[in-house]
């Protein structure tokens, strides 16, 4: 097979897997209470996975982010968490400012 055909097949396969799992979740979501222990457990697992990925990205970065020092990454993280809390949990402002602040500190 040509590499472009393999890429197209991979996109189709991953799209089907994603949409099937989302469709099955939508079908079964009516029976799950938001206040149930199972839902709270899945919520905790999702947040812990996200926290682990963010921690790994900050402590053991890959790619261009590894060019910056750990102290700079931690300063940007703490600053942006403060901005997130100060702006009443707005995600857009800290995201944009984190990129600007990180590039400024790396070039300074």
Image (cartoon, helix red, strand yellow):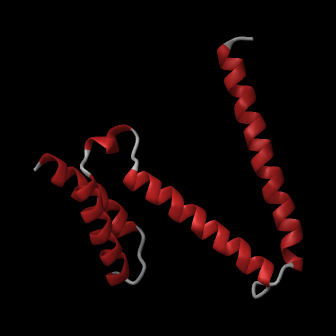
Question: Splitting the image into 4 quarters, where does residue 105 fall?
Answer: bottom left
Q: Is residue 27 left or right of residue 7?
A: right
Q: Is residue 59 left or right of residue 9?
A: left
**Which one is nearer the viewer's eye here, 23 or 61?**
61
Q: Residue at x 46, y 53 (%)?
A: 56
Question: Splitting the image into 4 quarters, where does residue 83 fall?
Answer: bottom left
- Residue that extends furthest to the bottom in the rendered view of this protein: 35
Give the image location of residue 39, x and y in percent: 76, 78
Q: Is residue 47 above or below residue 89?
A: above
Give the image location of residue 77, x and y in percent: 32, 65
Q: Residue at x 79, y 78 (%)?
A: 38
Q: Is residue 8 above or below residue 45?
A: above
Q: Is residue 84 above or below residue 106?
A: below
Q: Is residue 14 above or below residue 28?
A: above
Q: Quadrant of the N terminus?
A: top right
Q: Is residue 51 left or right of residue 6?
A: left
Q: How many marks?
A: 0
Give the image location of residue 68, x and y in percent: 25, 47
Q: Residue at x 71, y 80 (%)?
A: 40
Q: Residue at x 32, y 83 (%)?
A: 86
Question: Splitting the image into 4 quarters, where does residue 9 fall?
Answer: top right
- Residue that extends furthest to the left in the rendered view of this protein: 108
């Amino acid at each position: 097979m040509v590499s472009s055909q393999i890429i197209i097949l991979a996109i189709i396969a991953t799209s089907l897997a994603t949409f099937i799992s989302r469709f099955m979740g939508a079908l079964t979501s009516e029976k799950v209470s938001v206040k149930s222990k199972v839902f709270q457990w899945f919520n905790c697992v999702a947040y812990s996975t996200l926290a682990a990925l963010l921690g790994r990205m900050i402590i053991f970065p890959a790619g261009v982010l590894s060019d910056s020092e750990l102290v700079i990454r931690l300063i940007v993280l703490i600053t942006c968490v403060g901005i997130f809390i100060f702006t009443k949990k707005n995600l857009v402002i800290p995201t944009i400012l984190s990129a600007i602040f990180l590039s400024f500190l790396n070039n300074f």
